[in-house]
Image: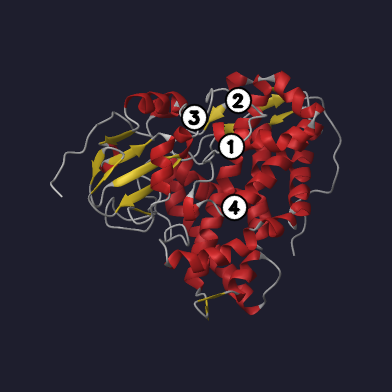
Amino acid sequence: MTEQARSPIAAFDHHSPEHAADPVGTYRALRAEHPVAWTEAHGGYWVLGDYASVFEASRDDDLFSSARHESGGEGLAIVIPKAPTAFHIPIELDPPTFRGYRKIVNKVTAPAAVKRLDPVIDRFVTGFIDEIIESGEADLAFVAGVPAAVTVDWLGLDASEYKRYVDAMHTLVSAAPGSEEYNHARDIAVPWVEKTVRAHIAKRRENPTDDATSEFILAEIDGRPMTDDEIYSILELLISGGVGTTASLVTQSLVWLYENPEERQRLIDDPSLLDAAVEEFLRVFSPTQALARTITRDAEFQGVHVHAGDRALLSWASANRDPEQFDEPDRVDITRWPNRHMAFGLGVHRCAGSHLGRAMARAMISQVLERMPDYEVDLDGLVTYPDQGTNAGFHSIPCRFTPGKRRGEPLFGSRR
């Protein structure tokens, strides 16, 4: 096709301080002016902000590839700029190669498998709240460590080291690229994760157990066992998703519930509303704000001319507030139903951990409302993620509450 200029052009950067200060407003303005626009930030990329364009792109794997390509440099293909991580299976694979690996992952993330984790989730939520419940004041964001601990434990790793996994994998998407925290994650924390997880894989090859890592070791792809590299690729992806997304969702939800005491009381009085409330929180507080694709050929898409090799950012967060799809999209309605949000993505790459994420979010919010129903957040003391481009949320939520009693034993005593 004839070479076409990349337009319209928007002054947009999802990693900028301006975006971090008001991501909802930034996306609202972008949608109103250009639902699909080109930005020169980070080497240039298309931003897809309305529901229709994100819906179409996320289901067109032939045009919008999740695989690694030369465009945009080296690193994780599903973020802009690319992050210095190992190759991630299956999220960086396109069909048909993708399908066999996804089938293996689905086995350990299916609803029935997650249901068996309910006692584990409850134990960790109880244990984390126990650590702060007697004090009467604490950082409520501490409870957001539950998803990381559950994920690490589920894989058979040492859950007491959950913070080290957060410092590595979550920091790569919550700290500004080039910052001291980002560089520490890239140069020190991520290599520690790789060394530790690879040693764990080797140990489980010799002595499989009932953890998820052993499931992958015993699984077959195309009639053969997976290699250590393939298993590590899957585990690093699961850790990356587990340490950040649900924490992002829950921290935002707990702050909103404090700011809206009548809605908080509704959930306390009628816990049956929690399932619908979590879906609405997923819509308005999309834990993964946006993910990237690479365009494979010159084409016309939603009225703009895209080029082979162009990078594209699919914003689930922006699509989830599109007034063309949702009535009063900026209003949080904990009874909204149906709720066709995109918080977990769409298409073949829809988040495999959605059932686990929902289960952990429900358990965390439920216990906080039950055991700390009168918590008061120091709004002036809130500390947001410095970068809101991939994950949004709070690093710190200082709060006060009526002290309560512990329910269980300390989580991290002697390890096996």
- Counting from the top left corner in percent of width and height, residue 384 is at 53, 30
Residue 97 as seen in the image, left or right of residue 372:
left
Helix, strand or loop under label 2: loop
Q: Alpha-carbon distance for marks 1 and 3? A: 11 Å
Residue 219, placed above or below residue 341: below
Residue 184, placed above or below residue 329: below
Give the foreground label among 2 and 4: 2
Q: Amino acid at mark 2?
A: Val
Residue at point 27%, 35% (across, down): 39
Q: Amino acid at mark 1?
A: Leu
Q: Residue furthest left?
A: 2
Helix, strand or loop under label 4: loop
Residue 374 as seen in the image, left or right of residue 335:
right
First-in-chain label (2 vs 4): 2
Q: Looking at the image, which is closer to me, 32 or 89? A: 32
Q: Alpha-carbon distance for marks 1 and 4? A: 14 Å
Mark 2 and mark 4 in contact? Answer it, CB < 8 Å.
Answer: no
Is residue 190 in view from this perspective? yes
Q: Alpha-carbon distance for marks 2 and 4? A: 24 Å
First-in-chain label (2 vs 3): 3
Q: Which residue is mark 2?
A: 332
Could you classify mark 4 by the number of other residues whose Cα lies within 10 Å: few (under 14), some (14-19), or many (20 or more)? many
Q: Which residue is mark 1?
A: 282
Assign the C terminus to one quadrant of the image: bottom right
First-in-chain label (3 vs 4): 3
Q: Which residue is mark 4?
A: 353
Residue at point 47%, 26% (across, down): 323
Q: Amino acid at mark 3?
A: Arg
Give the foreground label among 1 and 3: 3
